[in-house]
Amino acid sequence: MTTPAEVQASFKAALEEFEINDEQPDVNYYEKMVRAMFDVLVDVPYDEVDGTHNLVGIILEDAPYSNLYGTAFEKPTRPKAVEEESDAGEAVTVGSRRKELAHAAKKADYKLYEAGVRGARNFIVKVVAIEWIAELKQDEMGFAGVEPIALLRHIKPTLLGTHETDIIKLQQQMQNLHVDYP
């Protein structure tokens, strides 16, 4: 998949296959949701210039992303329409051609990044009941200005099931189990 339209189509297909639960999400549902988005994003050719990053950085926290790719995900900035103005009389060199190709690749990467963000955000908004994400909805723009990772971070503490902090509480409860029973 190489175009933003194909990224959107992949998210649409993933949404059609996803079994939506309108109740409070639990850990398993959250993991299925992230996995569905991961499966779409991981196959998108991205960062063609450096070959360092992958669009799964849109939905993964820094630590798991760094474990996979060796560095934190860098959110791209919109590239200029034209990288550098050149003199019309200037000869085209191999170096100038490489710069042009690198700039074109960065523009294509940014379009794929935007499509990935839109797709992931729309996926989350459609599969998670509104009451679990409503606080992030903006009056004028809805969820348009909210990054997918921000939605996931907002949802995570509300999940039913075992969290990292729950495991610590469980250990403490187990240590005092003999006190609670005669």
Image (tube, grey):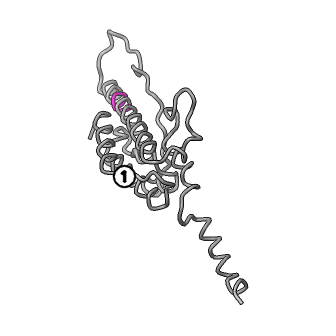
Q: Residue 115 falls in which quadrant of the image?
A: top left
181, above or below 57, in the image: below
Quadrant of the image for the N terminus?
top left
Q: Amino acid at mark 1?
A: Ala
32, above or below 95, in the image: below
Magenta range: 102-106
Q: Residue at x 44, y 58 (%)?
A: 29
Report which residue position mark 1 lands on.
Answer: 36
117, above or below 107, in the image: below
Q: Residue at x 35, y 41 (%)?
A: 46
Q: Position of residue 54 (x, y in %)?
A: 39, 46
Q: Residue at x 36, y 52 (%)?
A: 36
Q: Nearer the viewer, residue 173 or 3?
A: 173
Q: Residue 110 falls in which quadrant of the image?
A: top left
Q: Position of residue 66 (x, y in %)?
A: 48, 54
SS state under label 1: helix
* Prevailing SS of the magenta stretch: helix
Q: Residue 131 falls in which quadrant of the image?
A: top right
181, above or below 91, in the image: below
